[in-house]
Image (cartoon, rainbow, N blue to C red):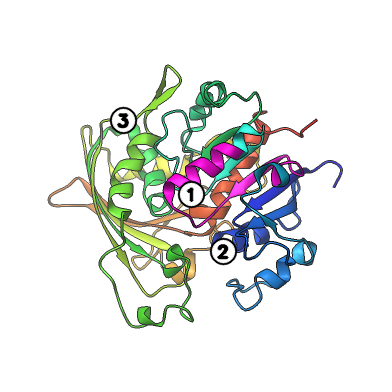
Amino acid sequence: MANKLKVGIVGGTGMVGQRFVELLNNHPWFEVTAIAASAGSAGKTYEQSVQGRWKLETPIPDAVKQIVVQDASKVEEVASGVDFIFCAVDMKKDEIKALEEAYAKTGTPVVSNNSAHRWTADVPMVIPEINPSHLEVIEAQRKRLGTTTGFIAVKPNCSIQSYVPALNALLDFKPKTVVASTYQAISGAGKNFTDWPEMLDNVIPYIGGEEEKSEQEPLRIWGSVEDGQIVKASEPQITTQCIRVPVTDGHLATVFVKFENAPTKEEILERWANFKGRPQELELPSAPKQFITYFEEENRPQTKLDRNIENGMGVSVGRLREDSLYDFKFVGLSHNTLRGAAGGAVLIAELLKAEGYIQPKA
C-alpha cells in the first residue's frame, strides 16, 4: 500500500463505478481508499450500498466491502484522503462539470468517465494509444482553475473505440468519408436484462445523443493543441447510426471508408497488425499487448466470442474488403465497459502517472 497511489471513486455504486472497483482490485499502482456516491448511500459500507444491485459477475472485492461510502458533494472531505479520483456519476451535465472542477481545484486530478467536459477546450479527451500529446493542455487548464496539481482528463464515448483505432492506424492514407453503424450493448445504458427486460428479443434504433458523439468526438481526438486548447480536425467527414441491441457487453461497428490516397488491403492489414501507442511503449499495466487484432474468419469478430480480447482492452477487426461505393469496409468490436469505460479510464490514469501528471499528494 505504501507505494501505491490512493484512489477515490466518485459515483462508485453505479455500473461503471462497480467496474472501477473490480479493475482496481490488486492493481499494481493504485489502491481504492475512498468511495463516494449520493447522499442516500453515504454512511453505509460499500457492500451495503450495492446490496441487490451489484451488476457484475465477479463478486464484490473484499478490500472494498467495508469502506464507508462518503457523500460525493463533500468535495474537500473526499479529496483529502486520496491522490486522485475516478468520476462516474449520474447527474445533469452542468452539475457534473461543477463537481469535477471543484475536485480539481482542491489539487486532485480527476479522470472522468462522464461526457460533461469532453468539449471543454483545455480538457484532454484521450484514447491513450492515439492522442497522448493532448495531455499538454493540462498546463493551461491548471492555470484556468488556479491549481498546480489538479486537473480533469476525460475518456471519449464508448462506441467510437470500436472503429476509431482502426481508422487511426490508416491516417497516413487520409480517410475522407466514413459511414459507421454501431450495434451497442445494454450495459452502455447502465442496464442488464434483469432491469431492462424490454430489450430481450428486441432492437431499438435510437440512443439519445449517441450519433452526434460518434460523429464529432473522433475529430476532437484527431485535433491539434493550439494555444492551450484542443482544436478539432476538419476531416474525415463521419456519419453514423447508433442502435441498441440485446447484448450484455460489447459495441460492434460496421464501417465504410473512402480515402484520398487509397491503400491496398495488404497495407491496411500491415498497419493494423503493427499499430502501437504510448501505453505499449511504456508497458502500462492495463495496456493490451496487441491493440488491434484482425480476424481472417468471415464470421468474426463476434461480440460474445471476442469482446474480452486482451482482457477487454483490445480492439477486434474483421471482414475487411473492397466496396463498390467506398474504398473499403470492415467490422470493428470493443468492450464498452472495459476499453470503452472504466478500463479506458484506468489506462488514462496509468499514462498520467507514467508521464508525471499524477503524483502522491504531499
* Pointer 3 or 2: first along the chain: 2
Which residue bears the numbered disc 1? 114
- Specify start and end residues of the magenta stretch as a single range: 78-102
**Position in image of residue 280 (x %, y %):** 59, 39
Q: Is residue 313 visible?
A: no
Which residue bears the numbered disc 3? 233
The residue located at (54%, 63%) in the rendering is 308
Of the numbered discs in the image, which one, if any, rests on residue 14?
2
139, above or below 193, in the image = above
The residue located at (34%, 34%) in the rendering is 171
Q: Is residue 100 magenta?
A: yes
**Amino acid type of the residue tagged 3 in the rendering:** Ala
Q: Farthest residue to the right: give it.
A: 2
Distance of mark 3 from mark 2, alpha carbons?
Answer: 34 Å
Distance of mark 3 from mark 1, alpha carbons?
Answer: 22 Å
* C-beta proximity under 8 Å, tags 1 and 2: no
